C-alpha cells in the first residue's frame, strides 16, 4: 500500500513539474515575441502586399516546418531553442497587423485591449482546465476536426477576401483556441501530456491566435478611421 501511495505521489509531482515548466517556458517565449513584434512594426512588408496569397502560403510553409522541427526535437534542448526562435518569428509576423492597428485612431488602446482580453481568456481557460474533475481527452477528435475546418476556411478566404468571412474566422479561432488551452492544461494535469515543450507550443499558438483574432475583431467593430 505504501508503494502505491509513493507511486501516486511521484505521478502527481511529475505532472506538477510538467505544468510548472510549461508555464515558465511559455512566459519566456513571450520575450522574443515582443522583440520580434517591435522589429516587425519597423519593417516593410511590401513583398507581402505585392503577393498576399503567395506570401501567406510561404508563411504557412515556414510555420509548419518549424512546428515539425520543434516536435521532432522536443526531448532535447534544441527543441527549446527552436521554440524561442519560432516565437521571435511569430512576433515579426505580427508586424503588418500591428502597423494597421497602430495607424488607426485609438490603435494603441485596441492593441492593449486585445492583449488584456487574451490574458483574461488564457487565465480563465487554464483555471477551468486545471480544476475541472472531468477528463477532457475526448475533445481531441473534435478539436482536430475544428482545426481542419478552420484551415480550409483560412485558405479559402485568401482567394475570396470577404470581410464578413474574415470576421467569422476570427471569432471561430477565438473559440477554438480557448478550448485548446483548456484541453491542453487538462491534458497535462491528467498525465496525457508529459513533454513541456510540446505543451508550450500548443498553448503559445493558441494565445497567439486569440490575440490576432481579438485584435481583428476589435478593429472591425471600432471602425477603420485613420488619424
Image: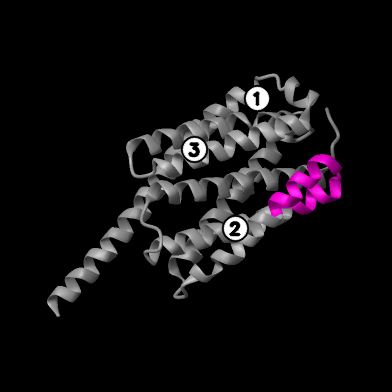
Quadrant holding the C terminus: top right
- Indicate whether 15 appears above or below 100: below
Q: Which residue is found at the position 22% from the left and 64% from the top?
A: 10
Tell which circle, 3 or 1, labels the residue nearer the N-terminal end.
3
Tell which circle, 1 or 2, labels the residue nearer the N-terminal end.
1
Q: Position of residue 20 (x, y in %)?
A: 35, 52
**Quadrant of residue 75 within the rendered picture:** top left
Instruction: Out of 140 and 93, give the one closest to the viewer.
Output: 140
Label at residue 30: 3
Q: Which residue is found at the position 74% from the left and 26% from the top?
A: 48
Instruction: Out of 159 and 33, give the one closest to the viewer.
Output: 159
Range shown magenta? 150-170
What residue is disc 1 on?
41
Q: Which residue is found at the position 19% from the left and 74% from the top?
A: 5
- Disc 1 crowd rating (10 Å Cα; few below 14, some 14-19, many 20+) is many
Relative to 101, 122 lies left or right: left
Quadrant holding the N terminus: bottom left
Q: Which residue is found at the position 70% from the left and 53% from the top?
A: 150
Q: Secondary structure at mark 3?
A: helix
Relative to 136, 111 lies left or right: right
Relative to 189, 45 lies left or right: right
Label at residue 138: none
What residue is disc 2 on?
178
Query: Does the magenta portion include 125?
Result: no
Question: Magenta segment, principal secondary structure?
Answer: helix
Relative to 54, 6 lies left or right: left
- Disc 3 crowd rating (10 Å Cα; few below 14, some 14-19, many 20+) is some
- Indicate whether 91 appears above or below 141: above
Q: Secondary structure at mark 2?
A: helix
Q: Position of residue 115 (x, y in %)?
A: 61, 43
Amino acid at each position: 500500500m505504501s508503494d502505491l501511495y509513493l507511486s501516486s505521489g511521484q505521478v502527481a509531482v511529475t505532472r506538477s513539474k510538467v505544468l510548472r515548466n510549461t508555464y515558465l517556458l511559455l512566459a519566456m517565449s513571450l520575450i522574443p515575441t515582443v522583440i520580434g513584434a517591435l522589429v516587425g512594426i519597423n519593417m516593410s512588408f511590401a513583398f507581402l502586399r505585392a503577393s498576399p496569397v503567395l506570401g501567406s502560403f510561404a508563411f504557412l510553409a515556414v510555420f509548419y516546418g518549424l512546428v515539425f522541427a520543434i516536435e521532432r526535437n522536443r526531448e532535447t534542448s534544441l527543441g527549446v531553442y527552436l521554440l524561442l526562435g519560432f516565437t521571435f518569428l511569430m512576433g515579426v509576423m505580427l508586424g503588418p497587423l500591428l502597423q494597421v492597428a497602430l495607424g488607426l485612431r485609438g490603435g494603441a488602446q485596441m492593441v492593449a485591449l486585445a492583449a488584456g482580453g487574451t490574458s483574461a481568456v488564457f487565465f480563465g481557460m487554464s483555471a477551468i482546465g486545471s480544476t475541472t474533475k472531468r477528463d477532457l481527452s475526448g475533445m481531441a477528435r473534435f478539436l482536430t476536426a475544428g482545426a481542419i475546418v478552420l484551415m480550409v476556411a483560412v485558405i479559402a478566404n485568401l482567394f475570396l477576401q470577404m470581410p464578413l468571412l474574415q470576421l467569422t474566422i476570427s471569432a471561430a479561432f477565438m473559440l477554438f483556441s480557448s478550448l485548446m488551452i483548456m484541453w491542453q492544461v487538462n491534458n497535462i494535469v491528467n498525465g496525457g501530456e508529459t513533454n513541456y515543450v510540446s505543451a508550450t507550443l500548443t498553448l503559445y499558438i493558441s494565445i497567439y491566435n486569440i490575440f490576432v483574432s481579438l485584435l481583428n475583431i476589435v478593429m472591425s467593430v471600432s471602425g477603420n478611421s485613420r488619424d
